[in-house]
Each structure stands twice: as C-alpha cells, then as structure tokens.
Amino acid sequence: MQGLNGFASYCSVGLVNTALHAAVLLTFNRMLGINQTWSNLAGFLSAVSLSYCLNARFTFDTERSWRRYLLYLSLMALLSLGTGFAGDVFTWPPVSTLLLFSAISVGCGYYVARRLVFVGRRS
C-alpha cells in the first residue's frame, strides 16, 4: 500500500499500539512506581511487536524478517528512551510523555518503516 492509504493504515495500527503502550506505561509508572524512562520503554516494547506484524501484513505488504524487526526495534527504542528520559528530567506527567512519543513516532516511525524496514513486496 502506498501514499495516503499506507499512511492511514499505519496510523490505524498506531491507534491500537498507542492504547497498549499507554496501558503498560501507566501500569508500570503509576501502579509499580517505575520511572518514566523505563515505563515508556516497557510500553513501547509491548506495542512494537504487534505494530511490526500488523504493519508488515496490512500497511506495507512485506514478509517479516528478524533483521528488519531488530532495525525497527532499535531505532524506535532509542526514540522511546529519549522521550521517557525527557519526561523524567522535566517531570512531565506520564500522559504528556506518551503523547509526545506518539506524535514523534508517527512521523519518524512511518519514515523509518517505509524507507528502511518494510522495503520490497511480498512474493
């Protein structure tokens, strides 16, 4: 899927992932008392596998591979850690951290996914 339809599909998958990410982040931070750096990373990690599989199948129509998954995971995890760290440093509410990460990851994540991770078509 290309262009606007691909981006719309990517955003739809992102809504599901954001809900999962939020639930994990808030559970780790509010209920378990873990700081935002690690809570945000845990939320991200819980959602990224689902995101990768759904986007490979529905958004980009490509085969899944461990190498591409690890590339996607690594780049987006760095973004997640950085956002969570900023939330700790500036003492933002966890919801603000989540919203900022979600906003940044929509644009950056789509670019990384389309240009580096999900290249080629399914045979």
Image (cartoon, rainbow, N blue to C red):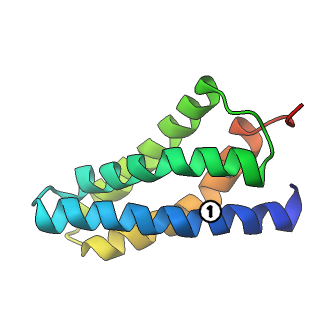
Residue plotted at (50% across, 38% down):
73
Residue bearing mark 1: 13
Residue at far left of view? 33
Residue plotted at (68% across, 51% down):
55
Q: Is residue 60 toward the left or the right of residue 68 in the image?
A: right
Q: Quadrant of residue 67?
A: top right
Up-down: is 65 above or below 74?
Answer: above
Q: Quadrant of residue 86?
A: bottom left
Work out which quarter of the rendered image holds the N terminus and state it.
Answer: bottom right
Up-down: is 22 above or below 65?
Answer: below
**Helix, strand or loop status at disc 1:** helix
**Residue 29 horizontal/vertical position (percent):** 18, 63
**Residue 78 horizontal/vertical position (percent):** 43, 43
**Residue 59 horizontal/vertical position (percent):** 76, 54
* Closest to the observer, 80 or 118: 118
Residue plotted at (62% across, 44% down):
53
Q: Quadrant of residue 22?
A: bottom left
Residue plotted at (53% across, 66% down):
16
Up-down: is 30 above or below 77?
Answer: below
Q: How many marks?
A: 1
**Residue 35 horizontal/vertical position (percent):** 16, 57
Q: Is residue 89 visible?
A: no
Q: Is residue 33 toward the left or the right of residue 40 in the image?
A: left
